[in-house]
Image: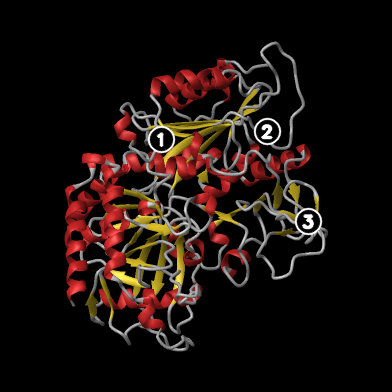
Amino acid sequence: MTVDATEIQQGAPAAASADLVEWVTTVAELTKPDAVYWCDGSEEERDRLRAEAVASGQFIPLEKRPGSFLVRSDPADVARVESRTFICSEKEEDAGPTNNWADPAEMKATLMPLFDGSMRGRTLYVIPFSMGPLGGNISRLGVELTDSIYVVLNMRIMTRMGAEALKLIGEGQYWVPAVHTVGYPLVDADGNRRDDVTWPCNEEKYITHFPETREIWSYGSGYGGNALLGKKCYALRIASVLARDEGWLAEHMLILKITGPDGRVYHLTAAFPSACGKTNLAMLRPTIPGWKVETVGDDIAWMRQGEDDRLYAINPEAGFFGVAPGTSLDTNPTALEALDHDTIFTNVALTDDGDVWWEGMTKEPPAHLIDWRGNDWTPESGVPSSHPNSRFTVRADQAASISPEWEDPTGVPIDVILFGGRRASNVPLISESYDWNHGVFVGATVSSEQTAAAEGAVGSLRRDPFAMLPFCGYNMADYWAHWFRVGEKLGDKAPHIFQVNWFRKDSEGNWLWPGFGDNARAIEWALRRINGEVEAVDAISGRIPVEGDLNTEGLDLPEGTYEKLFALDPEAWSVEADLTEEYFAKFGDKVPAELHTQLEQLRARIAAAREA
């Protein structure tokens, strides 16, 4: 029986504001759940919902990892669905050429019939949450309505969820509304009931964002960023619009705290497209003595100018939603060691003794597993045991690398911003931008070379500006212009910007740089540069190290490696400049003039290098 408005209003917590209760009532009248439950974030609630999820068969308890569970999704619901993700701005030009645009009124007309009755037979869960430390001046609040226990339990890990966030909303603080349904009602309009499944979802999927009204509506998927609406939907797509309008930055960046041998502390943010080593860098274990690296955030940074005019960053998330395959004691021991309790694993394999396994976790696979689809698996099966996008959800403070400042509501002051892509050639190991505007140009042109035929021509460039391509909530060219405005405000207090490339290869296709913990060597040079301790050489890409200043002590690099890591071919860079001009042309006259100026300056450096 569908819950009615009176029951909702009577059942709402005293701390709930009238406008929140009214909105919950409106959505419930549309979706028609059997009950409305207000999440309080308590451990008792967590344990009860876990038990319900186990009883339903959705959660499989893991004997080897206390408080941890394995979940298997529907094979048709395994990742973000970019083709079904829409920016519903009032003007198409405000979404820009890199987003899927839909007219907001037309999208609402499409969505409302889908949401009508979508929660029949289910419970609507009200999840009040804070993105960022509770009460911080950079933090923001939200409320997600969902019919998925999986979403509730993941949001409990990924955000500061529950009664404290509800209290702040009740006191009048701004909040973003987000509605999610798996689109699998258990009762139809005629009252006919069907059995539930362990992973309810719908073939039809919409993940929609309304920038002007700051709304998120998600239908049909129960997975990851499609359903955990605090993550990419709020923390980047909607937050990037808030940041544009309010003069701050919402970025797809990790945040590190770095302490040098002399005790001096630095903070760094870094933007990397997928498959470029972002998680490994977020939990970096330096191979050079005396340096300590701590994690403030692994994925997203919100940054605002502080009272001292410097840029301060918070991690708006409270957990890690990490890719499992490839995570091992060799590649990322900190992440792996964080997963020994209270972790939700999605679409990984189950071992015979009640543990989890995925490709790359150990050098030798187990002799037998139950794969992510629930089938028997052996090394001879010929298919991966875990989905390539399988995930773990774990609280950030379970990582040994977590910084004490990760919960500081004022954030940490940023000294350095890194941009990186996966480039086999052209881009050196590290180079320093000439100034803020040049740094924005570097961020705007970040790219990786295609590595598989499915992605396009092998060797061609896949652009991912600021690593924000799927996540910017408005026109990317306007986003670049916003970065220039922020730089003007920061002036000489702006962080220094560097470009890095861990993936350069020699002519035989061998990696030139060892990567992983040795990436701290390039970062060390960047920090010495901002301290004025080392000189640099002006080059096409930016300022690069003087040979001998990059710390390679203890590395067994073949002779000539340094020259190959920093080789800059003017002819190849001329082609790069032409490709950049073609790329900018996609955005028409919205491209900021400063970027065209930077392209002209790049071509001037190329011409000078030809003559040298």
Rate crowding at label 1 as few (under 14), some (14 to 19) or many (20 or more) other CA atoms within 10 Å. some
Does label 2 or label 1 sit earlier along the sequence?
Answer: 1
Number of marks present in the image shown: 3
**Res 502 → quadrant:** bottom left
* Residue 384 relative to residue 89: left or right: right
Task: Using the image as rendered, state which of residue 67 and residue 202 is in the foreground.
Answer: 202
**Res 545 → quadrant:** bottom left
Please determine whether, in this image, residue 383 is positioned above or below residue 74: below
Please say whether residue 346 is visible from this viewpoint: yes
Real-space CA distance between mark 3 and mark 2, rounded to the nearest whole angstrom: 28 Å
Does label 1 or label 3 sit earlier along the sequence?
Answer: 1
| Residue type pointed to by label 2 | Pro
- Per the image, the residue denoted by label 1 is 175
x, y percent for residue 235:
43, 45
CB atoms of marks 3 and 2 within 8 Å:
no
Q: Residue at x 29, y 54 (%)?
A: 580
- Per the image, the residue denoted by label 2 is 200
Q: Nearer the viewer, mark 3 or mark 2?
A: 3
- Per the image, the residue denoted by label 3 is 381
Q: Nearer the viewer, mark 1 or mark 3?
A: 3
Does label 3 or label 2 sit earlier along the sequence?
Answer: 2
Task: Using the image as rendered, state which of residue 271 and residue 310 is in the foreground.
Answer: 271
Rate crowding at label 3 as few (under 14), some (14 to 19) or many (20 or more) other CA atoms within 10 Å. few
Task: Using the image as rendered, state which of residue 358 and residue 406 is in the foreground.
Answer: 358
| Residue type pointed to by label 3 | Ser
Q: Residue furthest top?
A: 190
Task: Using the image as rendered, state which of residue 63 and residue 552 is in the foreground.
Answer: 552
Please determine whether, in this image, residue 462 is positioned above or below residue 540: above
